Image (cartoon, rainbow, N blue to C red):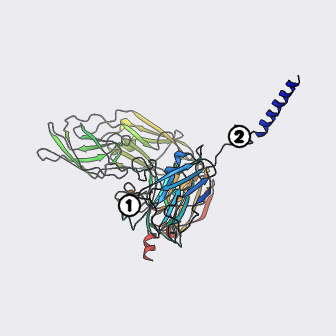
Amino acid sequence: MHCFRVKAVLCLFVLLLLCGCAKQGYPPGGPMDKIGPVIVSVYPLPEATGISGSVKPWIILDEYPNRNTVESSIFISPEPEEGFDVKIRGKRITVIFKQELPINRTVVVTFGAGISDQVGNQMAESYVLAFSTGDNVDNASISGYIEGMENPGAVWVWGYPLESFAEPDPRLNKAPYATQPDLEGSFTLSYLPKGSYRIFAVTETRRNRLWDSERESIALPPRDVPALEDQMVSINLKMHSVDLIPPSFRGAEAISRQTIRLSFDEPVAALKADISAMTERGQTLGIIDVYQNPADSNAVLLTTGIQREGDVYHFEIDNLCDLAGNEADSLIFEVDGSTEIDTVGPHFTWSSPSNGETGVVWGDAVLIGFSESITTTTIPAAVRITVRDSAVVEGKWSFPSSNLGKLEPSEPFENAEYHTVTVYCDSVKDIFGNTSPDSVGTFGFTTADVENTGVFSGQVANAPQELRIIATGIEAGGAWEEAVLEDGAFRFNDLPASLYSLTLYRDLDGNDRFSPGIIEPFTFAEPFKIWSDTLRVRSRWETGDFNLYWEASDDSSYFNRAKSE
């Protein structure tokens, strides 16, 4: 009995001891870790000088890193010729250079924001550790903002000194200076030698310090910028995917004695292409018209003179581009002539607004697309737009191409109403006199409610030429764009009530949209600026006297002025 009591007391003591030693903290299911690693210690000290060329820089984090994210997130500027290794021991990350660092050199080790903890939380921002093997640390810098990042942890900002790279190509040249943006898109390239730089931002998924144009997005700069010690120059960049591959020709066929169809592997812009055709005997086949079916943008349709049986036509096409502006090499091909007479009329294939579209602006035009060239005089009587089954919308017709009709309403559409567009196809004829085999085609759209819209107007100080403003709805969605007048005034009518962000850009090429630049031949992006404050547009109210400004440093010509000064 005494033995039993002793054992019981011992068991109780052990149980109490275990409970007392249990780890204190959140039980399973407690608060989720959403904070990335934080650097708590570094070596050498930031901006230290006189550092040995055999130094092994390190950082210590407040938690264990995910080893798979570390090495690819470290960048050394300038990049060591023999490379470097990374050693991870616990929470310490050490950089080991494979050769001794040169003397009198500023070395910048960037521990990128891509470094994450064990559950995938990334560092809030990159950490830049700079030191010098000489007596001074380079201290020039360039800052900026990146718009349109999908994965900040994969985005790198690359800086190329123009003294070393006359025309840097991120596909071929590794940048000697780099950093990563923070989660909001802001970045600073610091500890640079003074000079002129070309800056790129790249979503680098392959981790090879080069841009893969087929898989990785890029932001081209609006200008080259100076790195200065006494002034922080800023630059805005916009990420976009780049298509550098020209369209590939798939084939051609004569579908009637006066129609030839060309097919490509992607949508093309063919209306400005130079197209010629002739027989083996040197007789020219006239090209009467070039057009495209909006519903089949990979194809180009040619209306030709009458082809002859047995003739083979030799075609040559120049200046044909895809929608990204990539020009195909001169195309040379043959097509067997056809004697088939076109006996089938046009099909109604496309419309804008699309069927069921809502929020249509009251003054928007209605476009009707067909499968082939039409006799334009048959369109006005064949298309009827009604609202509430009775009121007929009148307007003026024009024809952007031979198979596309455009109706601009004489009066704004009815407010917040469903509009029905009826196309009496059997009244539409192609240019050969064939009536459409279809009977009636219909679609409808709903206009926005003017009672839920407001007006936004104001002035842009120091506005350059070709300046435009984009108002993007944060709550209601959609984007509206207006030009800024020569005196800097602007006005948006009938904006849906919402909270808006504002972007200003210079439409330097006059194409009525932001141009992100071209890598080959290199062309700068158009300069843009995102206004820091949001704008609230209220129903039936004008938000007027809204003042914006365009600084000299926002302009693409700023750097040229800075150099001359």
What's the residue at 32%, 39% (across, down)? Answer: 429
Q: CA distance from mark 1 to mark 2?
A: 51 Å
Looking at the rendered structure, the kind of residue marked 1 is Pro
Mark 1 Cα within 10 Å, few/some/many (few <14, many 20+)? many
Q: Residue 416 or 107: which is nearer the viewer?
A: 107
What's the residue at 60%, 54% (across, down)? Answer: 60
Residue 477 position in % (x across, y down): 56, 48
Q: Residue 239 or 257: which is nearer the viewer?
A: 239
Q: Secondary structure at mark 2?
A: loop
What's the residue at 44%, 47% (across, down)? Answer: 206
Quarter of the image for the N terminus: give it: top right
Q: Residue 458 or 81: which is nearer the viewer?
A: 81
Judged from this view, the residue extending furthest toward the bottom is 565
Q: Is residue 234 above or below residue 450?
A: below
Looking at the rendered structure, the kind of residue marked 2 is Gly
Residue 192 position in % (x across, y down): 49, 66
According to the image, label 1 marks what residue? 168
Residue 365 position in % (x across, y down): 45, 49
Q: Give the mark, 1 or 2, whose residue is nearer the N terminus.
A: 2
According to the image, label 2 marks what residue? 30
Can see residue 473? no
Going by the image, does 402 lie left or right of 337? Answer: right
